[in-house]
Image (spheres, coloured by chain):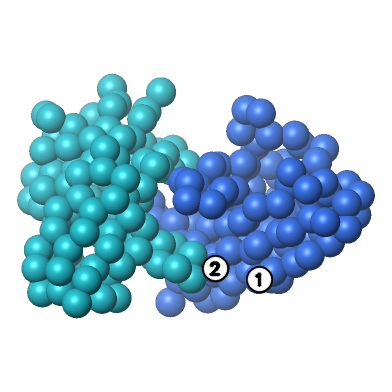
Chain colours: A cyan, B blue
Amino acid sequence: AQTVTQSQPEMSVQEAETVTLSCTYDTSESDYYLFWYKQPPSRQMILVIRQEAYKQQNATENRFSVNFQKAAKSFSLKISDSQLGDAAMYFCAYRTSGYSTLTFGKGTMLLVSP
Amino acid sequence: GAVVSQHPSWVICKSGTSVKIECRSLDFQATTMFWYRQFPKQSLMLMATSNEGSKATYEQGVEKDKFLINHASLTLSTLTVTSAHPEDSSFYICSARDTSKTPTDTQYFGPGTRLTVL
């Protein structure tokens, strides 16, 4: 069974600084997708970024980028120029290609201070 | 695009009653929808996968007779909590896959429903 591990229950960052959230996963599959979702206090899950395992290039979305290390089964999220609105719970998720369900990590609470 | 709504956003009910939660994909068709349960400060736990026109697939440990799921159309799935008890109090979230787009691997989430059973 696939597992997703987020080893940082909580992280803190100051506005305008950069923070990296860690995620590792365990799978025997070669084709899969990885995601980072953000859940702010409103509890609405918001897709931050996605990565296809077959792509070597790391995905980026504005201030958000990932460091995807397939051999190490690592998928970290880097948030640059942090903003107060980035404060939220961040979930790393995995999905096997061809299978629709997501496996979530336990989440990392990101605190952003002025 | 890819908006998913849930109704109601918050419901309080008495123990023993049934509660229905609706999940709608507003601007796309969703052949597959998912229902999650989330306890405070915890991750999402998948309860079941709902496929339009067929029976839902429940995860291990989820009571099928207690959590009834119906996916009668391409834009609507419902979760009915039958004979609710206080331990069913939780935050329920649905998601849907937009299979008309490429890639089709992305799930879009509803805003969630907070259920409180007294």
Residue B73 place in picture, x, y as percent = 70, 62
Q: CA distance from mark 1 to mark 2?
A: 8 Å
Callout 2, which amino acid?
Pro
- How many numbered marks does the figure carry? 2
Secondary-structure class at tag 2:
loop
Snapshot quadrant of residue B87 = top right
The reply to whether residue B43 is visible in this rendering is yes
Residue at (54, 68) in percent of width and height: B111
The answer to which of A47 and A106 lies nearer the viewer is: A106
- Residue A80 versus residue A23 in the image, above or below: below
Quadrant of the rendering where the N terminus of chain B is positioned: bottom left
Relative vertical location of residue B69 with respect to residue B73 in this rendering, above or below: above
* Residue B64 picture quarter: top right
The circle drawn on residue B9 is 1
Q: Secondary structure at mark 1?
A: loop
A28 relative to A46 in the view: left or right: left
Residue at the front extreme, as displayed: A114
Mark 1 Cα-neighbour bin, 10 Å: few <14, some 14–19, many ≥20: some
Q: What chain does badge 2 belong to?
A: B
Q: What residue is at 19 percent from the left and 77 percent from the top?
A: A114
Residue at 40% from the left image edge and 67% from the top image edge: A40
Q: Which residue is mark 2?
A: B111
**What chain does badge 1 belong to?**
B
Rendered image quadrant of residue A112 = bottom left
Residue type at mark 1? Ser
